[in-house]
Every structure is written in structure tokens, then in C-alpha cells.
Image: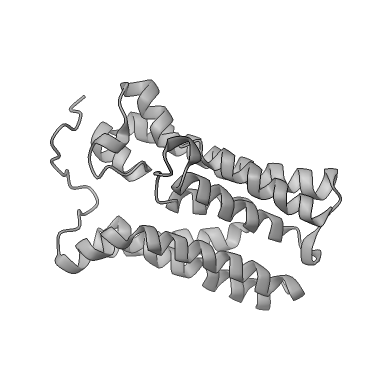
Amino acid sequence: MDYLAILFTVVFSYLFGSLNSAIIVCRLWKKQDIRDYGSKNAGLTNVLRVYGKGPALATLMCDLAKGVIAVVVCRIVVHQAMGVEFFDDPRFIGYVAGLTVMLGHCFPVFYGFHGGKGVLLAATTLLAIDPLTCVLSVGVFAILVALTKYVSVGSICAAVAYPTFTFILQNFVYDDGYAVIPNTIVAFLICVLIIYLHKPNIQRLMAGTENKFGSKKKEQGSSKE
């Protein structure tokens, strides 16, 4: 039953994550593929830069719902329907769901394995798993973006904060016992995934060509509507 629980969590979360909100919203709203415009990234920041606040807000709400739904559904099925709980901690299956829904979002099977960077989704899944760690990590993101004006810098630093706060809080505040290390390992994998997907941003930061938050990057073929 334990293997079935993991299998269900991985398959369901990955397929659900593959339903990319930015691509779906922009196709329904603008009849265009967001991956053809701006930075060509199927994520919230690119939707905001290319199409503005309306489509970006719709993408935000869909991504917020997607992360929470993946975690909640897996918890209900695994814990209540299957009666399985790993490491005597209800959070662990949430971390597994969080990682695999992000993999689906970043490498969606429905869209040629080319998706977004998963920062927003990491935040929403973490909100459903561990709200305090989520608040602290989002705080790191907000402070770094305010100081540097670079969304990528805030995202990378928040990614590093994710497993750091996970370990500190669960080890010294929550006292989660054997679950601390497994939970931290999965959180660390999410951190590595986010940083890996920000390699182009890191290269642009080093070259001094990264776009700052609030600035409008002129891209050929981007929508003016």
C-alpha cells in the first residue's frame, strides 16, 4: 500500500502540474502561446510583462489553486482513503506532491516538457504543507526583490530559504522526529530544481543584462493589448 500511495501521489501530481496555467489562460484570453513572446517562459512574470495585469492575475489564481489542490488531494487519498502515513508525519506526502506537481509544471508532458520555473507553485504548495515556512520564505523573496529589483534574485534566495527554514522549524520548533530529514531532503530537491531553472537568469545577472522588476522589456511580437 505504501508503494501505491507514492505512485498515486507522483502520477496524479505530475499530470495535474502539467496543466500549465499560463499557457491555458493566454490561449483562452489572447488566443496566443505565451512561449512565443517575451522571455518565452510559460510563467507568471512573463505573462505580466507581455499581456498585463488581467491575464497575470488569472494565471496567479490558477497556480495558487493548482499547488494547494495537488497537496490536499494527495493527503486525502493517501491518509484517509489508503490509510498510509510516512514517518508518522502528514507533511511528507505533501512534500512529495509538491515536488512532483512542480516537475509537471516545469516539464509538462502536455506541452513538450517546456513549462514555467515553478517559483509561485513552490510557494502555494508550501502554503498547504507548512504555512510558517511559506511566510518566512516569501518574506525573503519580498525583501530581496525590494532591495535588488530582480525577481530572479528573490526567487533564488527564497528557494535556498525553503529547505533552510524547513529544517530549522521542523527540528527545533515542531519537533517532527524522523520526518525532519526526509522532509528537508525533498525541500532541498525543490530548491535545486528552482535554481537549475534559473540558470539563464543567473547568466544574465552576471552579464548585467537581467531585466528588473517593473521595467518593460521590448520584445518583437509581444502584444500591446
How far across and how far down the image is residue 167, in percent?
A: 60, 74
Foreground pick, 83 / 90: 83
What residue do we see at 37% from left, 25% from top? 27
- Residue 48 position in % (x across, y down): 30, 38
Q: Looking at the image, what colour scheme do you see?
A: one colour
Residue 101 horizontal/vertical position (percent): 56, 47
Q: Is residue 191 left or right of residue 150?
A: right
- As drawn, which residue projects farthest toward the bottom? 172
- Residue at (59% x, 61% y) in the render: 132
Q: Position of residue 224 (x, y in %)?
A: 17, 27
Can you see residue 140? no
173 up-or-down from 194: above or below: below
Q: Quadrant of residue 24?
A: top left
The residue depicted at 58 percent of the width and 39 percent of the height is 16
Q: Quadrant of residue 43?
A: top left
Number of numbered discs present?
Answer: 0
| Residue at the far right in the pictured view | 83
95 or 104, which is in the foreground? 104
Quadrant of the image containing the C terminus = top left
Location of residue 22 by image quarter: top left
Give the answer, above or below, for where 164 lies relative to 148: below
Left or right? Give the position of 51 relative to 161: left
Residue 204 visible? The answer is yes
Which residue is pictured at 78% across the width and 50% down the height? 4
